[in-house]
């Protein structure tokens, strides 16, 4: 590749999507600068998958280390983008790169929207996942769960939360609260193996008896559905606690009820029925309410992007181009778009959960990054390279120095990894030691460099 064709691309975010973009662009011969909010790379792969999946995390880390070891890839960790952060979107655009890809994940949190959601003992699932994965800011925060935990949701995140509660917190009972019925459960049957040894089978049968008339009313066969559910409880991991796991179907949380200390004591729930909706079903409230006692509530209700970053934003999402903009119709899906001017934001692209929040896990995010890289490569082929890498890097370093930021490079990450691997302290559920605050990590890195 000639010097004229060699472009500089900035990738904001070092999770599976961002690292896939960086790998593809680097392979094509371009210079890649990675800006990452966290000190460590990995994003969802480091802080969003269940801790016991060490083999998956280890394999991804190996790939990412290989990428960061390449001379045309430049890593800046501990650099946040947004209003009042280390850099603004305008700062990043002014650095002179040919293109910028934002793959910063869904850093915002959807409002729970239930009366009483500020009570003690109410948690968002993402915060709990961050806690048990030791993300700085969450790892050392207390999560007091009590004896009976209600988890709202029926997907893989619910299973991960229940896994942590049964295997590591060893609470007395976990109940998954599901708005629709058992036929509409969303989790992967392979994931349920982590907790199926703790299933309260008698309780599940009673739950089916409670709702069977409502299932029959929409043409569902309760016996067949229960048989299918119970058949998923095979190859269960050995139980290590007395925790009982169960379900409450056709139930919508309406209000969180508290004691005199603003601590959760119960959920006020509404009974639902199912109604056909195309080829699917919808939950419809029956206006029948009851109390469901519990000590804490975890809402697995999805995520949204961070509207304070400064990218065009609407309804929990960054805005992408609604119009076909090239010969390839997929290109528009990855281009940032300013609705006020009716124009694409030239050279600015979105990938992963920044493009489509909470869509799939590591594999889906990586695939989205690969697709985005193809779009960016088509874009770069139409452009003349703006500035050499050295000029962009020098400008970036000067700006971070002015802002008194504390960026972490690959050398700092290597020192950190060596220290964590050699640590003899407790590993808790995560199976490995991690520094729990940015302050600890930065202090160690700066001590090593001194």
Image (cartoon, rainbow, N blue to C red):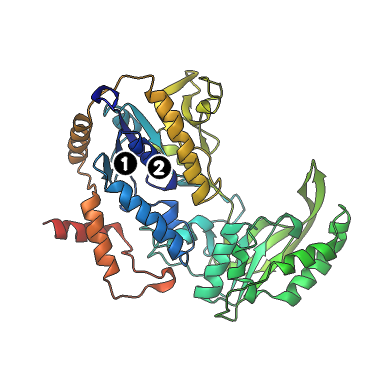
Helix, strand or loop status at disc 2: helix
Q: Nearer the viewer, residue 162 or 148?
A: 162
Crowdedness of circle 1 by 10 Å Cα count: few (<14), some, many (20+)?
many
* Residue located farthest toward the left when viewing the structure as drawn: 450
Residue 422, quarter of the rendered image: bottom left
Q: Nearer the viewer, residue 2 or 204?
A: 2
Which percent across, then down, holds residue 200? 69, 75
Residue at 31% x, 50% y: name it.
66
Label 2 or label 1, whichever comes before in sequence order: 2
Q: Determine if residue 181 is in view.
A: no
Task: Say left or right for 412 vs 330.
Answer: left
* Residue located farthest toward the front when viewing the structure as drawn: 1
Helix, strand or loop status at disc 1: strand
Which percent across, then down, holds residue 372? 46, 34
Task: Say left or right for 245 vs 73.
Answer: right
Q: Quadrant of the N terminus?
A: top left
Q: Is residue 284 above or below residue 256?
A: above
Crowdedness of circle 2 by 10 Å Cα count: few (<14), some, many (20+)?
many
According to the picture, the residue beneath numbered tag 1 turns out to be: 34
Q: Determine if residue 289 is in view.
A: yes
Residue 434, quarter of the rendered image: bottom left
Task: Say left or right for 183 vs 169.
Answer: right
Which percent across, then down, holds residue 46? 41, 56
Q: Nearer the viewer, residue 194 or 336?
A: 194
Residue 348, quarter of the rendered image: top left
Pointer 2 with pointer 1, Cβ within 8 A: yes
- As measured in the structure, the alpha-carbon distance from the residue carrying label 2 to the one carrying label 1 is 8 Å
Q: Quadrant of the C terminus?
A: bottom left
Which percent across, then down, holds residue 150? 62, 65
According to the picture, the residue beneath numbered tag 2 turns out to be: 18
Q: Is residue 139 above or below residue 12?
A: below
Q: Is residue 95 above or below residue 174?
A: above
């Amino acid at each position: 590749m000639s010097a004229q064709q060699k472009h500089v691309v900035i990738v904001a975010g070092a999770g599976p999507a961002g690292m896939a973009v960086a790998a593809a662009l680097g392979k094509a011969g371009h210079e890649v600068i990675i800006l990452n909010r966290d000190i460590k790379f990995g994003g969802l792969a480091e802080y969003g998958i269940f801790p016991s999946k060490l083999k998956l995390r280890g394999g991804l880390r190996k790939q990412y280390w290989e990428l960061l070891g390449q001379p045309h890839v430049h890593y800046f960790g501990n650099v946040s983008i947004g209003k009042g952060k280390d850099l603004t979107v305008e700062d990043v655009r002014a650095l002179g790169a040919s293109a910028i890809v934002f793959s910063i994940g869904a850093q915002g949190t959807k409002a729970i929207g239930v009366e009483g959601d500020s009570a003690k003992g109410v948690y968002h699932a993402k915060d709990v996942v961050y806690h048990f994965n030791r993300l700085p800011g969450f790892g050392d925060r207390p999560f007091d769960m009590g004896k009976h935990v209600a988890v709202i949701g029926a997907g893989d995140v619910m299973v991960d939360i229940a896994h942590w509660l049964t295997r590591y917190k060893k609470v007395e009972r976990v109940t998954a609260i599901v708005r629709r019925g058992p036929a509409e459960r969303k989790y992967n049957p392979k994931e349920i193996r982590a907790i199926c040894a703790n299933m309260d089978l008698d309780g599940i049968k009673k739950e089916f008896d409670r709702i069977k008339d409502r299932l029959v009313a929409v043409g569902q066969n309760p016996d067949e559905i229960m048989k299918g559910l119970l058949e998923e409880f095979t190859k269960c991991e050995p139980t290590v606690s007395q925790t009982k796991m169960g379900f409450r179907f056709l139930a919508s949380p309406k209000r969180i009820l508290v004691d005199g200390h603003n601590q959760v004591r119960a959920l006020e729930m509404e009974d639902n029925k199912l109604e056909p909706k195309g080829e699917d079903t919808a939950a419809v409230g029956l206006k029948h309410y009851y109390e469901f006692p519990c000590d804490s509530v975890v809402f697995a209700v999805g995520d949204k992007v961070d509207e304070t970053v400064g990218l065009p934003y609407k309804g929990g999402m960054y805005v992408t181009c609604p119009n076909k903009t090239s010969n390839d119709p997929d290109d528009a899906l990855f281009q940032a778009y300013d609705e006020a001017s009716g124009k694409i934001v030239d050279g600015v692209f979105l990938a992963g959960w920044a493009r489509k929040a909470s869509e799939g896990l590591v594999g889906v995010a990586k695939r989205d990054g690969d697709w985005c890289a193809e779009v960016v490569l088509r874009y770069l082929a139409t452009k003349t390279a703006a500035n050499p890498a050295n000029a962009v890097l020098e400008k970036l370093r000067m700006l971070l120095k002015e802002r008194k930021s504390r960026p972490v490079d690959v050398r700092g990450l290597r020192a950190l990894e060596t220290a964590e691997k050699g640590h003899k302290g407790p590993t808790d559920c995560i199976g490995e030691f991690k520094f729990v605050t940015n302050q600890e990590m930065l202090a160690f890195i700066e001590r090593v460099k001194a």
